[in-house]
Amino acid sequence: MTLLEEPIAAAIGAGLPLEEPIGSMVVDIGGGTTEVAIMSLGGIVTCKSIRVGGDSMDESIINFIKKRYNLYIGESFAEQVKINLCSALIGDKNVRMNIQGMCSFTGLPKTISVTTKELAGALKSPLNAIIDAVKQTLEKAPPQLAADIVNNGIYLTGGGAQLDGIDRLINAETDITVHIADNPLDCVVNGTAKAVEHINEIEKMYKGDFM
Ligand SMILES: Nc1ncnc2c1ncn2[C@@H]1O[C@H](COP(=O)(O)OP(=O)(O)OP(=O)(O)O)[C@@H](O)[C@H]1O
Ligand SMILES: [Mg+2]
């Protein structure tokens, strides 16, 4: 049985030149984890996985709103707030959204109206953890591969890649171009499918040899 590592699948799904002697970097921001990997010649050269992803962002939003507005909101609503209202950067996006929850003083339902700017800082801790993981992985890259990554950019995959401004934030922190993969949510699945096709070809080749 061949085990396909998730960052490899994500890189294949993102269409990166994985088989070539070129360094590629993928940051896969999922629900439970973020996987940062530098790959070359079809393998992982260095990687870091942290238990921080979209779920931690939702928790961060819940805590921020609890502290600042004395309002309890649930996890699935926090996810909607993240997707529709939040941004990784204070900047272009500024929308307003009604947030419904339970008042921590009265225990009664309460609705507040909040803007993107007012929630700045809500995602600070998970975003810092992701940036640290990216920087630490880059620091471990052999110089030639680091140069490739500077030239070709960092690729973001996973649902968290769709967070508004996350590409610009990582660019601002690393000075490297950041690309969001096409269909970032499907990269791992698409990459796995492509790899399976490839594995079948290889297996057929071997069968031919042995028969
Ligand atoms: N537009 C969006 N903005 C911000 N986050 C988003 C957006 N769309 C999806 N997400 C988040 O992406 C996450 C899911 O991503 P994904 O499907 O890649 O994770 P997963 O592969 O299931 O998790 P893991 O890789 O940790 O096992 C969820 O936390 C979801 O809230
Ligand atoms: Mg995933």
Image: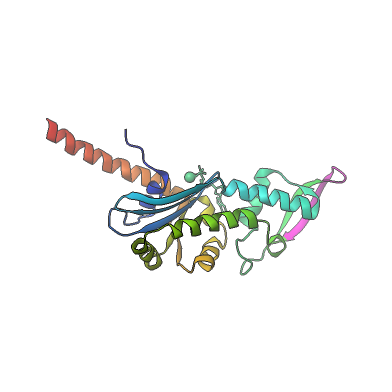
- Residue 8 place in picture, x, y as percent: 37, 48
- Tell whether position 168 is magenta: no
- Does residue 172 sit above or below 139 in this rendering? below
Q: In this view, does 97 lie to the left or right of 46?
A: right
Count of number-bearing discs: 0
Q: Look at the image and tell me in which quarter the C terminus lies.
A: top left
Taking depth in this image into account, of 151 and 180 the one nearest to the observer is 151
Is 25 or 188 nearer to us in this picture? 25
**Quarter-of-image position of residue 154:** bottom left
In which quadrant will I find the N terminus?
Answer: top left
**In the visual, does 54 lie left or right of 6?**
right
Instruction: Decide if residue 70 is on the left or right side of residue 8.
Output: right
Across and down, in percent, residue 125 comes to 64, 55
Residue at x 60% of width, y 46% of height: 55
Note whether 199 is above or below 42 in the view shown: above
Q: Which residue is drawn at 32% across and 36% down?
A: 2
Rendered residue at 54%/58% (across/down): 131
Q: Tell me the residue at 37%/49% (across/down).
A: 44
* Residue span colored magenta: 104-114
Viewer can see residue 34: no
